[in-house]
Image (tube, rainbow, N blue to C red):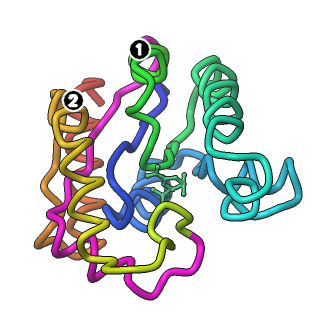
Amino acid sequence: MKNLILVGFMGSGKTAAGKLAAARLGMKFVDMDEIIERRHNETVSHIFETKGEAFFRQQERALVRELAAEKDRVIATGGGIVLDANNLRDFGRTGVVICCWVDAGVAHERTKHAKHRPLLEADGDRRAQVEKLLRDRELLYKAIPLRIDTSAMTVEHQADEIVRVYKQQTGL
Ligand code: S3P
């Protein structure tokens, strides 16, 4: 089966709904941040802190190339995957890329207690940080043709939608 790639901002439910969708489709679930953390034996926050964001983006880029060559995977990407157009191009060649959209207010609600999101850990107004980052990336997310607005969805509903779109695209 073709890979199913979930793209979207932090708090868009890529991991939670992705796991459910993978179980329903009988596919293997993988989370890119988790793979990078395992390989480096450190958290994404720590990688950002000690090696910098550019280094993390290189690791992400290399992993995209690796995963795009696989099949039968539901892949939860990190929110910044859209920053390099090559990532979406590679994933799109071998899989179905679905954007999980989320409004800033909901993204903030879902991520406000998280400790593992280095881009939202600066001092100051966290809600404003979410709004700014999402505004900066909005066009990149909205350029993805297959898109689900998850803002008012439960995880179960989101997983149903993901499965529905994937089946429609692959003729399953
Ligand atoms: C990032 C999102 C994070 C993680 C890193 C950078 C981003 O993943 O890759 O903190 O640039 O939006 P999640 O979207 O899974 O939180």
Q: Which mark is residue 16?
A: none
Q: CA distance from mark 2 to mark 1?
A: 11 Å
* Position of residue 149 measured from the top left corner of the image (x, y, whole percent): 13, 55
Check disc 1 and give the amino acid type. Answer: Arg
* Position of residue 141 measured from the top left corner of the image (x, y, whole percent): 23, 38
Q: Is the CB atom of the residue marked by disc 1 within 8 angstroms of ligand 1's nearest atom?
A: no
Residue drawn where x is 63% and y is 35% of the image: 54
Q: Are marks 2 and 1 in contact (CB under 8 Å)?
A: no
Q: Which mark is residue 89?
A: 1
Q: Is the CB atom of the residue marked by disc 2 within 8 angstroms of ligand 1's nearest atom?
A: no
Residue 21 drawn above or below residue 87: below
Residue drawn where x is 72% and y is 59% of the image: 49
Q: Which mark is residue 144?
A: 2
User: Quadrant location of the C terminus?
Assistant: top left
* Position of residue 87 measured from the top left corner of the image (x, y, whole percent): 48, 23
* Position of residue 107 measured from the top left corner of the image (x, y, whole percent): 26, 70
Instruction: Give the residues drawn in magenta, as a range.
Output: 93-116
Residue 162 drawn above or below residue 58: below
